Image (cartoon, helix red, strand yellow):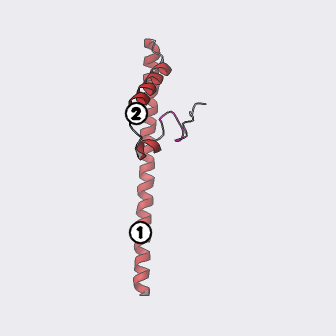
């Protein structure tokens, strides 16, 4: 029984090591994607400014349309937990404030 338990502990240890590697790799990929998105946002903002488009007005209009289309539909669990791209968490507080 002791050898079986020892073997199981070693197996769990190996799984944890692999999981840590996966988490670290995922964090690196997420950071890279976030950097790309930030760059794309900067480009879009520059293009919008050049074309005389009010970004805040567009985002407000999109938010209103989304809210109106979702009034009759309850949010799924995932929709409730996913933070807005402009917020730091699900509290709705803007990261730019």
Tell me where residue 44 appears, x and y as whole percent: 43, 23
Q: Is residue 29 visible?
A: no
The relative height of residue 61 versus residue 51 in the rendered view (above or below) is: below
The image shows residue 91 at horizontal and vertical percentages of 55, 40
Residue at mark 1: 14
The outermost residue toward the right is 97
Q: Residue at x 58, y 30 (%)?
A: 96
Question: Can you give x and y, in whole percent of width and height, for residue 62 in the image?
Answer: 42, 25
The foreground one among 62 and 70 is 70
Magenta stretch: give its range: 84-90
Which comes sooner in the sequence, label 2 or label 1?
A: 1
| The C terminus lies in quadrant | top right
**Residue placed most toward the observer, 49 or 68:** 68
User: Percent x, y for residue 46?
Assistant: 46, 19
| Disc sitting over residue 70 in the figure | 2
- Asked which secondary structure carries label 1, the reply is helix
Indicate the quadrant containing the N terminus: top left, top right, bottom left or bottom right: bottom left
């Amino acid at each position: 029984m002791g050898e079986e338990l020892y073997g199981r502990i070693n197996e769990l240890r190996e799984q944890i090591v692999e999981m840590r590697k996966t988490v670290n790799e995922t964090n690196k990929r997420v950071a890279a994607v976030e950097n790309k998105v930030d760059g794309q946002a900067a480009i879009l903002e520059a293009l919008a400014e050049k074309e005389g488009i009010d970004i805040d007005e567009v985002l407000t209009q999109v938010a209103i349309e989304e809210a109106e289309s979702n009034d009759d539909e309850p949010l799924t669990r995932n929709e409730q937990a996913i933070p807005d791209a402009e917020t730091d968490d699900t509290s709705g507080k803007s990261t730019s404030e």
